């Protein structure tokens, strides 16, 4: 078993755009996939992208059977996806909680396409094509973002939803058993605002919680 170090937010290597894989079935590619699989398993991740272990290639792995970090998540077949392409099937989006092995201890609300078609190749160059929805679609979009130097905090519905997992769970804002479960847009932020108002903190925090003061609607999807 080879567990590699997972890069954390702030490391500039996570912001690089990864290169396509040009040769399939090589010992180097199989070794990379083994390292990704072992590291994902050791960290109880739902997925992992090659850039997260400092390899700037367009390779991701994802899959869930039983996972202590996502006890209510539906199963996803383990998949190695190389040179992936994602196409939304329609315009429907869901807002849901996400975390990341490269952003340890934090969660936030992210808007994703609800249904997608993804294409790519396996380790031997055989084509893969699937239409998926829900949690499966969210995981694939999250992992493929890494290939373009994008992490989930870049896609937050609202920066006010970002917080430490334990604090969000303790306050009831984050479901303990479903960190990536779909949520109604604005619901989390409304509860957060209510708690702050009960503690008379909103005025003191001022611009940080600006949407209410400026008359903007919370929870808008990113463009």
Image (tube, helix red, strand yellow):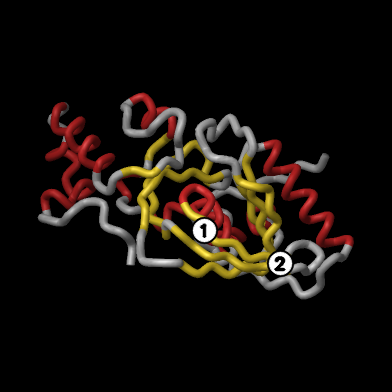
- Quadrant hosting residue 206: top left
Residue that protrudes farthest toward the bottom in the picture: 22
At 54% across and 40% down in the image, what residue appears?
74
Read off the residue under disc 1. 141
Res. 90 in view: yes
Q: Is residue 91 above or below residue 211?
A: below
Q: Position of residue 81 (x, y in %)?
A: 67, 61
Position above or below: 108 against 142: above
Looking at the picture, tell me which residue is in the foreground, 218 or 73. Answer: 73
Residue at 30%, 51% (x, y): give it. 158
Near mark 1 (Cα within 10 A), the count class, few <14, some 14-19 or many ≥20, is: some
Percent across and percent down for residue 214 are 12, 55
* Mark 2 vs 1, N-terminal side: 2
Residue visible at 25% across and 41% down? 187
Residue 56 visible (yes or no): no
Q: At 20% from the left edge and 40% from the top edge, which residue is drawn? A: 190
| 9 sits to left or right of 30 | left
Question: Which element carries disc 2, helix, strand or loop?
Answer: strand
Other residues around mark 2 within 10 Å, as few (<14) / some (14–19) / many (≥20) = many
In the image, farthest residue toward the right: 27
Depth check, mark 2 against mark 1: the one in front is 2
Q: Residue 25 got which mark?
A: none
Report the disc number at residue 121.
Answer: 2
Position of the C terminus, as image quadrant, is: bottom left
């Amino acid at each position: 078993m080879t567990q590699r170090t997972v890069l954390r937010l702030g490391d500039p290597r996570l912001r690089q755009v990864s290169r396509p894989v040009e040769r399939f079935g090589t010992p180097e590619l199989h070794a990379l996939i083994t390292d990704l699989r072992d590291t994902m398993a050791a960290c109880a991740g739902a997925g992992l992208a090659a850039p997260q272990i400092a390899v700037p290639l367009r390779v991701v792995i994802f899959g869930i059977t039983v996972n202590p970090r996502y006890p209510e998540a539906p199963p996803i077949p383990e998949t190695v996806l190389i040179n992936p392409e994602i196409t939304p099937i329609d315009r429907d989006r869901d807002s849901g909680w996400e975390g990341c092995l490269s952003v340890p201890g934090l969660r936030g609300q992210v808007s994703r396409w609800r249904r997608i078609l993804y294409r790519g190749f396996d380790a031997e160059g055989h084509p893969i094509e699937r239409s998926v929805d829900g949690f499966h679609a969210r995981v694939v979009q999250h992992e493929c973002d890494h290939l373009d130097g994008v992490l989930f905090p870049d896609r937050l519905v609202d920066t006010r939803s970002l917080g430490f997992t334990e604090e969000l769970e303790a306050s009831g804002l984050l479901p303990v058993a479903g960190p990536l479960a779909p949520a109604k847009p604005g619901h989390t932020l409304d509860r957060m605002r209510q708690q702050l108002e009960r503690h008379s903190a909103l005025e003191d925090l001022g611009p940080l919680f600006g949407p209410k003061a400026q008359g903007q609607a919370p929870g808008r999807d990113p463009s």
